[in-house]
Image (cartoon, grey):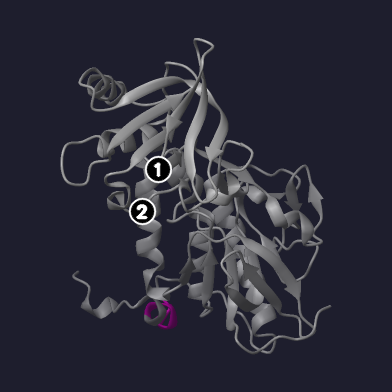
Amino acid sequence: MTELVTASVTQTDAVIIGAGPVGLFQVFQLGLLGLHAHVIDSLPHPGGQPAELYADKPIFDIPGIPVCTGQQLTHNLLAQIAPFSATFHWEQVVTELQPQPDGRFLVSTSQGTQLLAKTVFIAAGVGAFQPRSIKLDGMEQFLNRQVFHRIHDAADLAGQQVLIVGDGEDAIDWALRLSDAGPGAAASVVLIHRRDAFKAPADKVAAMRERCAQNRMQFLAGQPVGAVSDAHQLTHLKVLGSDGITRQVAVDRLLILLGLSPKLGPVTEWGLDIERKQLVVDTEKFSTSVPGIFAVGDINTYPGKKKLILCGFHEATLAAYAAAHIIHPDQPVLLQYTTTSPQLHKRLGVNLHLQPD
């Protein structure tokens, strides 16, 4: 146990780790019970795996919705939880989870956010999504100065010699955007991938090849093998080409766009029972081995577990009721129906008397 912390941190009923569909639905179930939540996610946006990996692909097994994409599901869940005004913390990884003497948990993130929560819900899916990278000696010092895994504003790359490592749609989109004519264009754009094949729509690959034919950008088939720098900045990237020749390519900004990889990360250090990289829970409360910490969705395991979104919604519902008993131990937690409960209507911000017949 650590010393009780109450100052300079935000106090809340619940912290939800993960903003995928199950994490978002956890906000809803807690909100119906009058509980406020803070949500932390390593991505810069909500939706988790469905929004990141199959945003435009159809999902057919959400009850009551014949078909929707991952992005549409995310949009609908955000609309559903809007009345509860959850607080979101994007592009942050929970680095520490420390039990406090009064039963609460101090949650600390990679960006220095600290939250003191009565309950914690781990809805991290298969883990926090981290960008895949390349490991080259001496390059770490330039991360987020010249080397980036995400770019928020293309204007930051205007007039720069830009190298892009990747073979997916994101890499090609950035190559096309930065090689487009106009004031925001890069001085030069070189797309690097180990082979001349891409995981991107054919029309975008064709557009990239046309830009190369017009000498508005270059494609180099090869593998980065070294970084060249002076005392202050990265100057060149060494690339071993498919022809066996190593070239030094000048660089001002390096974009490494190799997709994302899920990692459990610090979760393994929180003293929770883990089985095959999943958190062991009961099927009454979906509590982990530490009371007050729940696990819902693909991150958990129990007899008969099925990794389906709709199963995660069920788990989030029971976990919310269990959490309410912890947060308000002296108050009964009544089962109410959104169809008939005036209290739930008030929390949802609806007035059924104003609804048309």
The residue positioned 60% from the left and 64% from the top of the image is 110
Q: What amino acid type is highlighted by mark number 1?
A: Asp
Question: Disc 2 or 1, which lies upstream in sequence?
Answer: 2
| 164 sits to left or right of 105 | left
Dot 2: element: loop
Q: Residue 308: which quarter of the image? A: top right
> Is 273 rendered above or below residue 105?
above
Outermost residue, right side: 1
Residue 150 at x, y percent in the picture: 43, 48
Q: CA distance from mark 2 to mark 1?
A: 17 Å
Q: Is residue 61 visible?
A: no
Of tags 2 and 1, which is closer to the observer? 1
In magenta segment, residue 134: no
The stretch in magenta equals 340-345
Residue 58 at x, y percent in the picture: 38, 36
Pick the front one: 44 or 102: 44
Residue 153 at x, y percent in the picture: 31, 53
In contact (CB < 8 Å): disc 2 and disc 1: no
Pick the front one: 354 or 306: 306
Pick the front one: 324 or 300: 300
Q: Which residue is mark 2?
A: 152
Q: Is residue 53 visible?
A: yes
> Is 2 rendered above or below residue 217?
below
| 328 sits to left or right of 282 | left
Work out which quarter of the rendered image holds the N terminus and state it: bottom right
Q: Residue 326: which quarter of the image? A: bottom right
Outermost residue, top side: 243
Dot 1: element: loop
